[in-house]
Amino acid sequence: MAKRAPKSKPFTIRRTLLRWSFRAVAAVGAVLVALVLLFKVVNPPTTFYMWQEGQRLGGVSQEWADWDEIAPVVARSVVAAEDANFCLHWGFDMGAIRAAIDQGGNRGASTLSQQVVKNVFLWHGRNYTRKVMEALITPVLELLWSKQRILEVYLNVAEFDEGVFGVKAAAAHYFAVEPAELTAVHGARLAAVLPDPKGRNAGNPTSNLRRRSAAILDGAETIRRDGRSACFEP
C-alpha cells in the first residue's frame, strides 16, 4: 500500500495561521458581544476617546445622568437633529445612506446607534477596520439593547464642548442647571453643537447656531406629534 505523501510545510503553516486567525477573530467577537451585554445594564465608566481627551487636556468633565434625570425634550431634540428615523431603523438608515451616496459622501449618514458603537466600543477615525467593526456590532447593539438604552448611553458619552462629555456636564457647563431642568431651547442648542462640539457654543450661539436650534425645536415637536419618538418615550 502506497504511503500518503506528507503535507508540505508551507501548507501546514498557512493552515495553522488561518486557524489561529479565525480563533482570534472569534475571541474578539465574543469579547465585544460580552461588553454589549454588560453595558446593557452597567453604565460605561469611560470611552477610549474620552480617555484620549483626558490625557490631552489633563482631565474631562463627565458625570452619568440616568434616563429619568434627563428632560425628555433633550432626547427628542438630539434625535431630531442627528437621526430623525431612529425609531424606524435597525441601526442603519438606508435612506440617509443613499442620500449620502447621491451627494458624493459629503453628507453624514451615521445613526445614533452607530455613534454609540463608535464611541463606546471602538475608536474615532475613518479607517476601514473601524467601519467594518462598526457595521458588525451595530445590529448586535440594536438586537440586545432597547432604543431608550441606546439613547441614554449616547446622551452620556457625547461631546458637547472641548472636554465636556454627557448631558449632565453640558447642562452645568452651559446653563448651570441639572439635566432635568433643561428647557426645549436648551435641548435644541445642545443638539445643534453635536456635529462640531469644539467649534460651536450652546451658551453663546452664533446667528447660524440660533437658526439651526430653531429648526431642531420644530423637528423635535414634529417627531413627538408623528410618533417617531414613541420607541423611547412612554
Image (cartoon, rainbow, N blue to C red):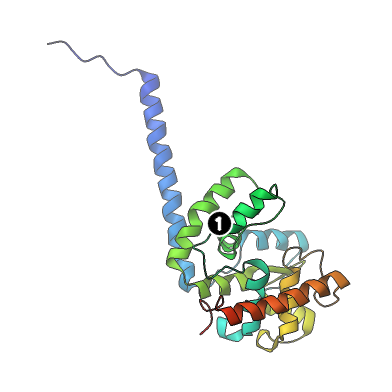
Q: What residue sits 53% from the left and 82% below the top?
A: 233
Q: Position of residue 95 (x, y in %)?
A: 58, 58
Type of amino acid at the residue the image marks with label 1: Met
The mark total stands at 1
Q: Quadrant of residue 198?
A: bottom right
Q: Position of residue 173 (x, y in %)?
A: 77, 78
- Of the 4 image quadrants, the one containing the N terminus is top left
* Residue 27 as seen in the image, left or right of residue 157: left
Question: Which is nearer the eye, 43 or 222?
Answer: 222
Q: Secondary structure at mark 1?
A: helix
Quick check: 38 above or below 170? above
Question: Which is nearer the eye, 47 or 226?
Answer: 226
Q: What residue sits 67% from the left and 63% below the top?
A: 50
Residue at image mark 1: 94
Q: Position of residue 45 (x, y in %)?
A: 58, 69
* Residue 164 as seen in the image, left or right of residue 228: right
Q: Quadrant of residue 66?
A: bottom right
Q: Is residue 65 visible?
A: no
Q: Is residue 146 visible?
A: yes
Q: What residue sits 82% from the left and 75% below the top?
A: 210
Q: What residue sits 44% from the left and 56% below the top?
A: 31
